[in-house]
Amino acid sequence: MMTPQILDLLKRFSVKASFFFTGQNVSTYQDIAIRAFQEGHSILSHSYSHPDLTKETPENVKRELLMTEDMFSTVIGRRPAVVRPPYGAINEEVLSVLKELKSIAALWSIDSLDWAPNISVDNIVRNVLNNVRPGDIVLMHSYSSLNVVLEALPSIILGLKSKGYKLVDIGELLNMQVYK
């Protein structure tokens, strides 16, 4: 997992971010989740096992999200109130379960495309900096095969700051509590 190196970069540039962890990853990488939380980043839900929630029954969606909340509670002592559905897949049934659990869905407005095969660092940086608008949420990933993120992130941070943007986590952006 590349998250520790990303945390190092964020600390170096004094930037707070929102990390959407699966419950499985919070369980497997407890030390990283704790570190990110202790450093002031938002640690939020990306389901437990990363299924397309729109293809699950409401009962399974609820189970996925509650298992995730339970794992977060065990590891960081907080229950996330914000969920980024895997693949950005959402429908009325998923929204209904989220409402029942007193959670909200958060998607993104700019996909950095860092996940795309053979994408270059320059393309990632250009994609973000050329398309950003006030209030945007930029989607980036921190799994181990994405060295391009580590290379692109400093240029993105410096580029956004030079354009006058303040980089904040989703709680500050939306002026809301991100934990229950």
Image (cartoon, grey):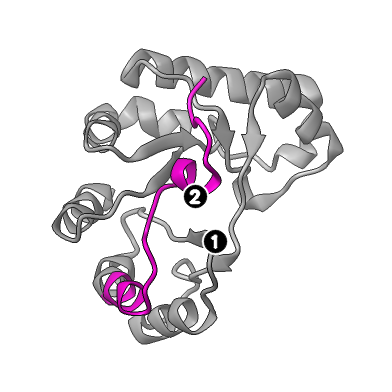
Asked if disc 2 and disc 1 are in contact, CB closer than 8 Å, the reply is yes
Q: Residue shown at 25%/36% (left/top)?
A: 32
Mark 1 lies on a secondary structure that is: loop
Whichever of callouts 2 and 1 sits on the residue coming sooner in the sequence is: 1
Dot 1, how many residues are within 10 Å of its Cα: few (below 14), some (14-19), or many (20+)? some
- Give left or right: position of 108 versus 148: right
Q: Quadrant of residue 54?
A: top right
Mark 2 lies on a secondary structure that is: helix
On the image, the x and y values in percent for residue 62 come to 69, 21
State the mark number for residue 135.
1
**Vertical order, 109 against 34 (above or below):** below
Q: Is residue 118 in sight in this rendering? A: no
State the mark number for residue 77.
none
Chain part drawn in magenta: 155-180
- Give left or right: position of 22 versus 91: left
Instruction: Quote the CA–CA distance across marks 2 and 1.
Output: 7 Å
Tell whether position 157 is magenta: yes
Q: Residue shown at 74%/25% (left/top)?
A: 99
Q: Residue shown at 35%/15% (left/top)?
A: 77
Of residues 178 and 116, the one drawn nearer to the viewer in this rendering: 178
Q: Residue shown at 44%/30% (left/top)?
A: 24
- Give left or right: position of 124 versus 50: left
Tell whether position 166 is magenta: yes
Q: Residue furthest right?
A: 92
Figure label count: 2
What residue type is disc 2 on? Leu
* Disc 2 target residue: 173
